[in-house]
Each structure stands twice: as structure tokens, then as C-alpha cells.
Amino acid sequence: MNQAVLAILLFALLVLAITSPFAGLAGLMFILISLAFMRTIWTIINAGIKTPPKKS
């Protein structure tokens, strides 16, 4: 679950980098943000699919 939280945090940081007034390579940043968005969704889906370990 920590990986999902980390992915969301990195996604938020990328959004801030794109919306900052000093983002010079906005086109490249939009590609990065779209890939980060897809990875974030994928990580959240994987975290929801994984079953907790069985306690013996």
C-alpha cells in the first residue's frame, strides 16, 4: 500500500511541476504526466487486487 501512496505523491509533484510558471518543456512534461497518471492508476489497481497474506 505504501507504493500506491508514493505513486500518488509523485503524481501530485508532477502536476505541480507542469503548472509552475517555470516549466520550460511543457510538451515533454505533459507526456510524463500522462505516463505517471497511467502508472498511478495501475499501482492503485494492483494494490486493490492483492490479497493480504494468510495468518497461520
Image: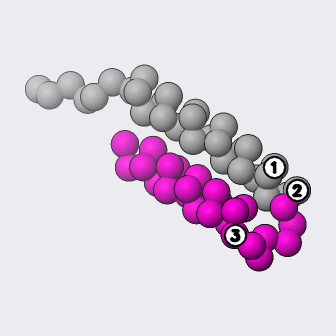
- Image mark for residue 22: none
Q: Percent x, y for residue 50?
A: 39, 26
* Marks 1,2: beta carbons within 8 A: yes
What residue is at 64 percent from the left and 42 percent from the top?
37
Range of the magenta residues? 1-26
| Mark 3, other Cα within 10 Å: few <14 / some 14–19 / many ≥20 | few
Is residue 3 at least partly visible in the picture?
no
42 with respect to 38 (left or right): left
| Residue occupied by mark 1 | 31
Q: CA distance from mark 1 to mark 2?
A: 7 Å
Q: Secondary structure at mark 1?
A: helix
Q: CA distance from mark 3 to mark 1?
A: 16 Å
Q: Percent x, y for residue 24?
A: 85, 72
What residue is at 58 percent from the left and 33 percent from the top?
42
Q: Secondary structure at mark 3?
A: loop
- Please, what is the three-letter code of the amino acid marked with disc 2? Gly
